[in-house]
Image (cartoon, grey):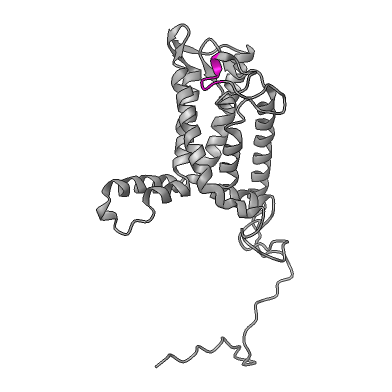
Amino acid sequence: MSAPPIPPAVSPASSQPRERAKIRVRTLRTDRWWLAPLLTVLGLVAWVAYATVRAFMQKWYWVDDYHYLTPFYSPCVSNGCVPESAHFGRVLPDVWFIPFAAFSLPFLLLFRLTCYYYRKAYYRSFWLSPPACAVSEPHTKYTGETRFPLLGQNAHRYAFYAAFLISLINTWDAIQSFHSPGGFGFGLGNLILVGNVVALWAYTLSCHSCRHIVGGKLKHFSKHPVRYRAWTFVSKLNGHHMGLAWTTLATLAVTDFYVMAVSAGWFSDLRFVG
């Protein structure tokens, strides 16, 4: 016997189905709900402006004395790259509109744009969809991520593989920086490069796609103890994905600025050994 249908909620006074409250104002919140999206806009715009200028500057990216290579130019694959900085060869023409790291920057941009956290960040801050909880958005129709260009968000799982490979390249760059022409040594630049690599690995491995790759499609964790431990570790990182997303923007900018400053001769590297 099927259960009887549940009657709609009715108003005691009119015995008619209840309607949603019609609120004319955009929100009833009295706190500064607009501050978070505003700061997000300012932070992302400032970082993108800096990164764009540096990617097309095509100078002050390599410190030959200590083999420091900024991550904005890694891997350096243009014919305009200093030969010592091109660890994987020089194959691209040397023209101003092609970044020296053209093989990596598009994939890193795709990885960040399709990242689950960054989607939330720019959906709320740039598109106001919605700008905050309990605040109405200006859009009258919602189609989710089923249409172009948002349909491309599904490429995130594939961009992860490229980001993983690029993190390996950044790790190699950091290792190479300990072996300068004068032999083994390290300075403040080495610590900055290594710190940036550690932060990049934490952000990359905390990705939701990585979490699915490590522990997805398993019905019994007890039968896969190694994958379960890896999934547990990635899950803990995943809880800090938002913080790591912003942290890596900061470490990338600091690392690039430090290499640029030393390369330009604004100040010398602080050496500890060698």
Q: Is residue 233 above or below residue 177?
A: below
Residue 175 visible, this angle: yes
Q: Main secondary structure of the magenta part?
A: loop
Residue at 58%, 47% (x, y): give it: 114
Percent position (x, y) of residue 104?
57, 32
Say whether residue 221 is magenta.
Answer: no
Front one among 255 and 10? 255
Image point (51%, 13%), residue name: 66
Image point (28%, 45%), residue name: 226
Most distant residue in the top direction:
182
Residue 193 % position (x, y): 49, 24
The answer to whether residue 86 is magenta is yes
Instruction: Estimate the x, y position of residue 111 in percent, counting from the top left.
Output: 56, 42
Dividing the image into 4 quarters, which one contains the N terminus? bottom left
Q: Quadrant of the C terminus?
A: top left
**Placement of 217 over or under 51, stated as above or below:** below
